[in-house]
Image (cartoon, rainbow, N blue to C red):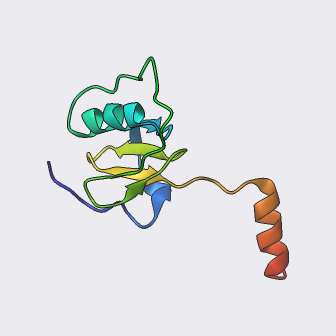
Amino acid sequence: MIVLPPPADMSNVDIVESHVHSGSSTSEAALKQWIEGGDYVKPTVETRDNVQFQLPDGETVSAGDTVAKATDGTFFVKPQPKDFTQNLIDQVSQGL
């Protein structure tokens, strides 16, 4: 597998598939199987633990993160959009 870092500008990335990591070790196992070239199979039962793991490029995946696969085959944590309130706070703090 070729490991490339995700592009800095995510606006031009075409995503083939994406899945959310629940934080459980069963979710981790399903995502790792997918990343290693298998099919993603959503766990029918999830453990109650909370684990993090690393993508091939070293990026950390935590509970609630969305792991995405780009058309070039790279995997990355999809940035979460800020909510409306956070955007408003940022704009006010910048004097916009």
Q: Residue 37: horizontal and vertical position, in percent?
A: 20, 34
Q: Residue 30: horizontal and vertical position, in percent?
A: 34, 31
**Picture residue at 47% right of the left edge, 58% below the top:** 10
- Front residue of this view, candidates 94 and 46: 46
Q: Residue 51: horizontal and vertical position, in percent?
A: 43, 46
Task: Give the tally of numbered discs.
Answer: 0
- Does residue 72 lie above or below 21 as drawn? below
Tell me the quarter of the picture where residue 26 sits.
Answer: top left
Residue lying furthest top: 44
- Front residue of this view, candidates 43 and 65: 43
Is residue 60 found left or right of 91 in the rendered image? left
Is residue 40 found left or right of 84 in the rendered image? left
Q: Quadrant of the C terminus?
A: bottom right
Tell me the quarter of the picture where residue 40 sits.
Answer: top left
Residue lying furthest left: 1
Is residue 93 found left or right of 68 in the rendered image? right
Residue lying furthest bottom: 95
**Picture residue at 26% right of the left edge, 45% below the top:** 73
- Does residue 47 lie above or below 23 as drawn? above
- Front residue of this view, candidates 12 and 55: 55
Q: Residue 12: horizontal and vertical position, in percent?
A: 45, 55
**Picture residue at 37% right of the left edge, 38% below the top:** 28
**Picture residue at 26% right of the left edge, 33% below the top:** 33
- Front residue of this view, candidates 92 and 66: 66
Is residue 20 found left or right of 57 in the rendered image? right
